[in-house]
Amino acid sequence: MISDAELVARVVGADDPAAFQVLVERHQAPVRGFLRRLLAGDHGTADDLAQETFLTAYRRLGDLKTGASLSSWLHSIAYRQFLQHLRRHERQRVVPEPPDAGHDPRTAVDAEYLAPRLLAEVSPPERACLTLAYAAGMSHGEISDVTGLPVGTVKSHITRGKQKLQNWLKEHDHSIPPEALSLKEARGA
Amino acid sequence: MPETPFDETLERILAYPEAPDGTEADGFVVDVMARVRRAQRRRQLILAAFGGIGALFGLAGATLLADPIGRLLAVETLSATTLMQGALLTCGAVAFYVWVMGDDLTLQR
């Protein structure tokens, strides 16, 4: 398999669209997943921002430092796209609807149902830090590179965000039965 | 990075949605590549337009300056030897500048 670095060199050196297509195919799922989490489930906007992310990456691929992680770089562009989107739509921010009255959350503890509601409880930087830490599995240093925040701030965002999510889950009596989560995994398989 | 049971729970809840199915992913890639090709065409068009304008200016300048340059070169003080010395001096100055700047001509570091 051709490495990301080789593909980047081909795009920068020869403006090879086929090489860039391979990069898009390889990185589209994590970038779209990250934006979907940041936008608390608004898949349409997330995909629009993901397209903008790849277009910006194509224009600025020459700026990528040798040896730097392409994935972290793409995530940082996506995060900036998200912040710009927030600034543009500050007044019309969408907050996911709360669970229906009479709805027993324990029967529908589905990550796709719960994640947007949970993430709507934390601030955008906390959301980004939590998503990068738990969904993308990045280290504090990598998260700091992506978000441009100091490592100490990243750590406190994660701690504070976790606390808020724990409190929300307790308030809404959302104990997560393991079988519900394994159900989701089985569906995904 | 799960350290506590709650970390594990969070990891499972926040995990990215299942990878988009083939059709959705293909559609996304097709859309991105269509926009990339448009951007590529636009860039080529801009380069061609500015390159063409630049070439026209160069041609006009060469036509206008052909006579004065010819007269200047005919003068004894600007002989071929003097021009050669000038070119060598310029190359030396550029090499010295590159060496002093440590190859960082754009001053990014």
Image: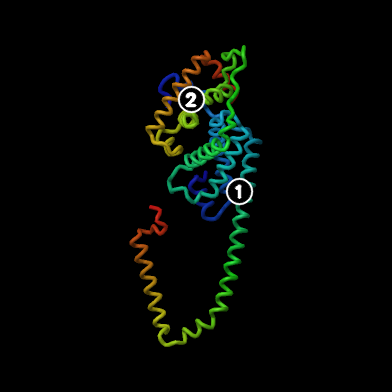
Distance in Å between CA atoms under marks 1 and 2: 34 Å
Residue linked to disc 1: B36
Residue under the image location 47 percent in, 39 percent down: A72
Left or right relative to B29: residue A162: left
In the picture, which quadrant includes the C terminus of chain A?
top right
| Residues marked 1 and 2 touching at CB (< 8 Å) | no
Q: Picture quarter containing residue A153?
A: top left
Q: How many marks?
A: 2
N-term-proximal mark, 1 vs 2: 2
Residue A109 got which mark?
Answer: none
The answer to whether residue B80 shows anywhere in this view is yes
Could you tell me the amino acid type at mark 1? Answer: Val
- For mark 1, does the 10 Å Cα neighbourhood hold few (<14), some (14 to 19), or many (20 or more) residues? many
Residue under the image location 34 percent in, 62 percent down: B99
Whole-percent x, y for residue A8 in the image? 51, 49
Could you tell me the amino acid type at mark 2? Answer: Glu
The chain carrying label 1 is B
Q: Spot the residue most to the front.
A: A91
Element type at mark 2: helix
Q: Do the residues at discs 1 and 2 belong to one chain?
A: yes
Residue B11 got which mark?
Answer: 2
Residue under the image location 36 percent in, 70 percent down: B92
- For mark 2, does the 10 Å Cα neighbourhood hold few (<14), some (14 to 19), or many (20 or more) residues? many
Left or right relative to A99: residue A142: left
Residue under the image location 56 percent in, 25 percent down: A116
Whole-percent x, y for residue A50 in the image? 57, 39
Residue sitting nearer the eye, A6 or A140: A140
Residue sitting nearer the eye, B75 or A58: B75
The answer to whether residue A189 shows anywhere in this view is no
Whole-percent x, y for residue A94 in the image? 59, 29
